[in-house]
Amino acid sequence: MKRKKLAFIIPSLKAGGAERVVSTLTNQLIKDFDIVIVVLYTCVPFYNLNSNIKVVFCKDNYNSTPTFFQSISNHLALKNTCKKVILKENADIIIGFTTIANIYSVLIAKQIKVPSIISERIHPQFGSISSFWVKARKLIYPKTNALVIQTKEIKNYFTKYIQAEKVKIINNPLAEELVIQRDTHTSKSNHIICVGRLTEQKNQELLIRAFANIKRNDWKLLLIGEGNKKEAYKQLVDNLKLNDSIDFIGNVKDVSAYYNSAKIFVLPSNYEGFPNALIEAMYFGLSCIATNCPSGPSEIINDGENGFLIPVKDQLALEQKLSTLINNNNLQIQFKEKAILSTSVFEAQHIANKWKELIYKFL
């Protein structure tokens, strides 16, 4: 029997949450399907992809400051390029990741009469898209065959204007190449790590200021990731005279070495979709503190059992929980055991099977 072909559409394959999910997912699904990933803008893929996965780029550069008419023209041209690729590849289903790619996916699927599955990766109330795309989303999303989201809170948002049976909760998978690197016997350093883009959304400033206020002894804070707040955060660290205690690591392809050797992980975000880094850190057995932000952390952490939840932007609460963990080795061990146990459900094969089940409904 001829294998069915899946066409994924995503803006980029650089470092990032949606990009990691698509890479992990397609590496699993290639066992059962032929796959092409249609990438809107040319880039070097950051995550490893199976050599049997075809990647096609649509456009060389992203114009970050287009006029309104340039923007409309760019999007029409990009959508048509995607359509040509998908027709040439003879795809049986289109799967979109992130809002603009999702809108392209639904429109193309309707034009060429194939099913579409789309996937939002962040809480829609807090995304940075313009009001034009919010309106387009409300108009176009109801025409898809299925919308995949990660949490009940996000489902409640979308079922206001999309049929509830079309909205499916499937959590993010743990990357397989990361999972095999877990080593619970590695000797641990007194390191607190935070993995994520250095942006307003991720709010590493909260963590830097909290770390500055606690009794640190020989503990170090490692910030892993790049982003537009990096220089501002470096200046803040300099002003607080913490250059010896805080390191900026940058983007890391294989973050497992840091997960294996650190003791504490902090997610200080203002909002999320479903935080990959949090489930990774818990899977590696780190003691985790996360803000109870919309959405995701409260569906991953049971406060006080397998980690701590704190209110968003609450620096004092973060200081208290950091101090508690730093000074309580028994609690670190308790959190480690329960975190590992509670995150096994996110292993890639388990999540890919849920996607497979959904895809087969429409083939």
Image: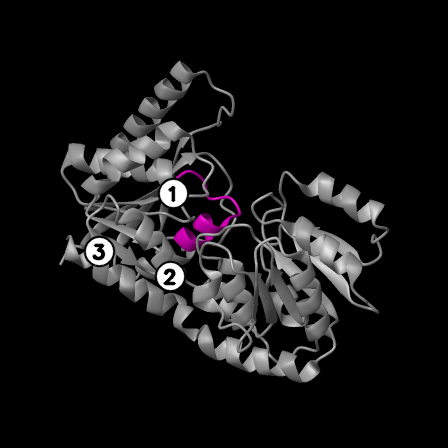
Q: Residue 140 appears at what percent x and percent y? A: 24, 35
Alpha-carbon span between mark 2 and mark 3 = 15 Å
- The residue drawn where x is 24% and y is 43% is 161
Alpha-carbon span between mark 1 and mark 2 = 15 Å
User: Which circle's residue, 2 or 3, is located before the other in the chain?
Assistant: 2
Query: The residue under label 1 is which amino acid type?
Result: Thr
Q: Quadrant of the N terminus?
A: bottom left
On the rendered structure, is 28 left or right of 244? left
Would residue 87 be seen by someone viewing this image from the given angle? no
Q: Residue 44 appears at what percent x and percent y? A: 51, 41
Disc number placed over residue 98 in the picture, else none: 1
Q: Judge whether 329 appears above or below 247 on screen.
A: below
Alpha-carbon span between mark 3 and mark 1 = 18 Å
Q: Residue 279 appears at what percent x and percent y? A: 50, 65
Please identify, in this view, whether the residue under mark 2 or under mark 3 is nearer the observer.
2
Q: Which residue is mark 3?
A: 359
Q: SS of the residue at dot 2?
A: loop
Would residue 194 be seen by someone viewing this image from the given angle? yes
User: Which circle's residue, 1 or 2, is located before the other in the chain?
Assistant: 1
Q: Which residues are magenta?
A: 10-23
For residue 305: magenta? Answer: no
Q: Which residue is mark 2?
A: 171
Query: The residue under label 2 is which amino acid type?
Result: Asn
- The residue drawn where x is 60% and y is 43% is 200
Q: Are marks 3 and 1 in contact (CB under 8 Å)?
A: no
Q: Residue 152 appears at what percent x and percent y? A: 34, 59
- The residue drawn where x is 53% and y is 60% is 277
Residue density around tag 1, few if under 14, some if 14–19, many if 20 or more, within 10 Å = some
Q: Judge whether 215 appears above or below 203 on screen.
A: below
